[in-house]
Image (cartoon, grey):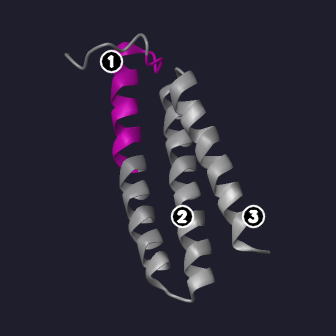
Amino acid sequence: MSLEYYLILSALLFSIGVIGVLIRKNAIIIFMCIEMMLNAANLAFVAISRELGDVSGQIFVFFVMTVAAAEVAIGLAIIVSVFRHRETINVDEINSLKG
């Protein structure tokens, strides 16, 4: 397969992620859409890296995966804490983080 197909798929996944972040109100779904956007960027990095025969794109993927893992750990901890206090994860109903 050529590079164009991978980049089109990456752009499609990124667009779906952006639409999900903008439209959805559930915090967990928003985090999943952000993960989809990060994976779309990873796909583009790996595809370009493969096309150029260079490993620098794969090194960027490693760093993006590290950021994604940290985002999941911190984000889910915040969501659990907010759910315990507010009993909802709807973003519209959570307007402040005051206790």
Residue 29 in view in this figure: no
Question: For the residue marked with disc 1, what is the amino acid?
Answer: His
Q: Which residues are magenta?
A: 73-91
Residue 17, quarter of picture = top right
Question: Is any atom of residue 90 visible in this view?
Answer: yes
Q: Is residue 6 left or right of residue 15?
A: right
The residue at the point 64 percent across, 56 percent down is 10
Q: CA distance from mark 3 to mark 1?
A: 46 Å
Q: Residues within 10 Å of mark 1 (few under 14, many from 20)?
A: few
Residue toward you, 33 or 51: 51
Q: Residue furthest left?
A: 98
Alpha carbon of mark 1 to alpha carbon of mark 2: how far?
Answer: 35 Å
**Magenta stretch contains residue 74:** yes
Q: What residue did someone put label 3 on?
A: 5
Q: Which residue is mark 2?
A: 42
Q: Residue at x 36, y 15 (%)?
A: 94
Of tags 3 and 2, the one toward the viewer is: 3
Q: Residue visible at 71% across and 66% down?
A: 4
| Residue at the front extreme of this rendering | 4
Mark 3 burial class by Cα count in 10 Å: few <14, some 14-19, many 20+: few
Percent of width and height locating residue 32: 55, 41
Q: Specify whether 6 is left or right of 98.
A: right
Q: Majority secondary structure of the magenta segment?
A: helix
SS at mark 2 in the image: helix
Give the image location of residue 60, x and y in percent.
Answer: 42, 72
* Tag 1 residue: 85
Q: How far apart, in angstroms, are the residues tagged by discs 3 and 2?
A: 15 Å
